[in-house]
Amino acid sequence: MDNIVKKTWNALGSIHLTIVVLLLLVIDLAGGYMRLKGNETIFTPLNDLGLIKWINTYGTTYPSHTAWLFALFILLFLLAVNTFVCTTNRVFVLIKNQRHCSNRLRFILKFSVHIMHYALIVILIGYLVSYLYARTYPNTIITPGQIVHIPNSDIQMQLESYDIQYYQGKRLQFLNNQAFKIQAVLLLTAGQKNVQKTIAINAPFLFQGLSFHLKDFAPKYKAGMKRQSYISLIIKKDPGMKFYFAGTLLFLTGLFMYLYQWSLLHTKKEKI
Amino acid sequence: MFFSQNMFYLAAFFYFLTWVVCISLRDRGTLLFRCLFSIGLFANFLSAGGRYYFSWPMMPMFQGPFFLPLFIGILSLKAIWQKQAGCGLLVSVVCFLSLTAAFFPNDFYLPFLKSRTIFSHLFFLLGVTGKACFLIAGIHAIDHIRQQNRLKKQVIWGDRGRAARWIVWGFVFWTLSMFSGETWSYLSWGSPVVWNDATVTMAMATWFYYGCFLHLYLLKTWGAEKRVYAALFGAVLVLIFNCCPELGEFQMPDPEYFQFWKLFAGKPWIIS
């Protein structure tokens, strides 16, 4: 029994499996490009609906277009397992041989590649959690003074004020008299708690586990037909977000450690 | 845009002249070669600068093909300037890429407000740098294969390592570009992957391909010869899957763009 477990463990951590899975991923994603191009409307709702609802609707309705995505999930799962087993084996060997490394810094730097591998797993877990458990309200419209209640929460929000700056100048001619910068102030109420938050394009904020992103607004033009003022928000509760950003930071740490190790090695070679 | 497009045609013309001088005079005419290439590179720089100038603080959307020859030229400037091994191929590729960008321009997209963040700029610029590194690695691989066939013997190890070094750097830039894209996507749309652009799959495929290459290279699973071919194949993949989708249909340049004196008559680049 022990032998079977050991053999399976070794097979799962094999570098040959890594190469095969990586090449299959390349082929699958190339196929995915062909299916995705021109059919973006099938895949765009994936972020709003979540994976399960998307599979039950778009995923099963257009199997010839979506099969590559299912294959991608399977391959990414295999890659995550392979990466975990392979990296863990190597980390154990490295720790075992700690005695042979006299320089502490060099020993720590040897973990750089393994940090990147573990980080990849954390990122993939983050994406999976996000697609499985995220709750999205993709188009919450709010007009000045209006009070909007966010579903499945006790949060209410009110658009207190907004400031739209319109571009005037000759450099960006296409943008003349069009909105160039917007900033809105929202008053959020959760129970007894009142908080003022400022939102802008590419400047979301977090409140009670929800992230608020500015999606759209009006009026966009300084002149012309008078339009009702509003802002449109993407409100998201995404438990995977912390994972994928933590994974990204971890990967970057490993990457810079690796580059530092590489430069040390290079300097040493040059001295020789 | 008149200025940027004008300058790009000028750059492509000088790159073409450099290529003609390079293949016809070979080891002679170094000064002429250097002068022509410098003018081409400078015009390309002005063109890229112009594109940024007319969209800043937003990102010049889908302008990668106009930046790519410039980045390859800058990154391999030393090799080209000193007419090192592979110089002819480098100039040929720069010339080829600039001509394809000139004759197959993509549809022009106006910069949009959501690209007004440092992460969109990092995503774009690091992505172009990564692509340039991968293509330079491919050029070194071709040069290695050519030399080997000519000499009918093993070429020294250092030549093979050059392609791999470019790939390591390409992978670093490509990874940083993808992480910047992830952050930009989260800030703007609340999700790390936006499925409304098919090229996202090809960016992932490229990352997995070079991830696979680095495993083969660092673990020495494959022989050096096979790795050279893998580097070449990677460059072909980058050309087909990352560069071609950014191109449009064949289009003869508008004769108005060749009236260079208009640059000085109208001074369209002067800010108001």
Image: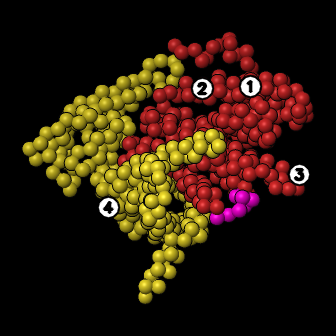
Counting residues from the start of the chain, the first of labels 2 and 1 encountered is: 1
Label 3 neighbour load within 10 Å: few <14, some 14-19, many 20+: few
Residue assigned mark 3: B150
Counting residues from the start of the chain, the first of labels 3 and 2 encountered is: 2
Residue assigned mark 4: A133
Q: Is residue A188 magenta?
A: no
Q: What secondary structure is marked by label 3?
A: helix
Tell me residue B251's x, y (percent): 73, 38
Tell me residue B179's x, y (percent): 47, 46
Colour that chain A carries in the picture: yellow
**Residue A199's image quarter?**
top left
Q: Is label 3 in contact with label 2 (beta carbons under 8 Å)?
A: no
Counting residues from the start of the chain, the first of labels 3 and 1 encountered is: 1
Residue assigned mark 2: B49
Residue assigned mark 1: B38
The amino acid at mark 2 is Gly
Residue A180 appears in the figure: yes
User: Which one is nearer the viewer's eye here, B234 or B99?
Assistant: B234
Q: What secondary structure is marked by label 1?
A: helix
What chain does badge 3 belong to? B
**Whether residue B226 is situated above or below residue B186 in the rendered picture:** below
Region in magenta: B221-227
